[in-house]
Amino acid sequence: MDAARGLLMFLPLVPFDGGAVTLAADLADRARHGGTAPAALILNVLDADTIDHLVSLRFAPEDPGAVTDAHRTLDLLHGTFTAHGFAPYRTDVDHPTPRTPLHQRLKDALDPGHVFAANR
């Protein structure tokens, strides 16, 4: 990999269904429309029900406009995929996964002092 290139990744789970896969590809295309961060899309079949998508965005880190555009594209991916029920299975600090009551109880049990990742 070229060390002079920036990389952001979006990792949603999509149902193994032709309509859902087509919609996911369309959402990825629309998120980057008019932008400078070309998206690469890789699909991995996990089981009979689920496809793991990997949307990668490469950008020139020395170009402030490219950095802004790549992050804007990532924001759009998170927003549009989540709105259609395609949740990411890995998130970043700017797009944390909403915590369920079970997640909160586990976090409280494992980190009662809230020392680790205090804001997440």
Image (spheres, grey):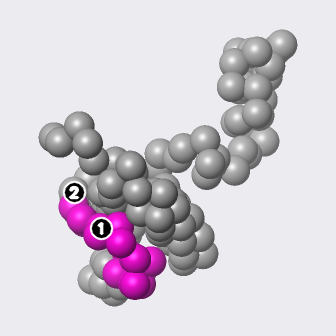
Element class at badge 2 = strand
Residue 60, x across and y down, in percent:
33, 54
Q: Is residue 81 left or right of residue 19?
A: right
Q: Quadrant of the C terminus?
A: top right
Residue for point 29% across, 69% down: 38
Q: What's the residue type where badge 1 is placed? A: Ala
- Give the residue at mark 1: 39
Residue for point 24% across, 65% down: 40
Residue 113, x across and y down, in percent:
83, 13
Q: Quadrant of the N terminus?
A: top left
- Kindly indicate whether the residue at mark 2 contacts the one at mark 1 (C-beta within 8 angstroms): no
Which range of residues does the magenta coloring cover? 28-42
Residue 63, x across and y down, in percent:
40, 56
Please rate how many residues cluster around mark 1, counting C-alpha atoms within 10 Å: few if below 14, some from 14 to 19, many from 20. Answer: many
Q: Is residue 81 visible?
A: yes
Residue 78, x across and y down, in percent:
54, 64
Front-lying residue, 2 or 64: 64
Q: Earlier in the sequence, mark 1 or mark 2?
A: 1
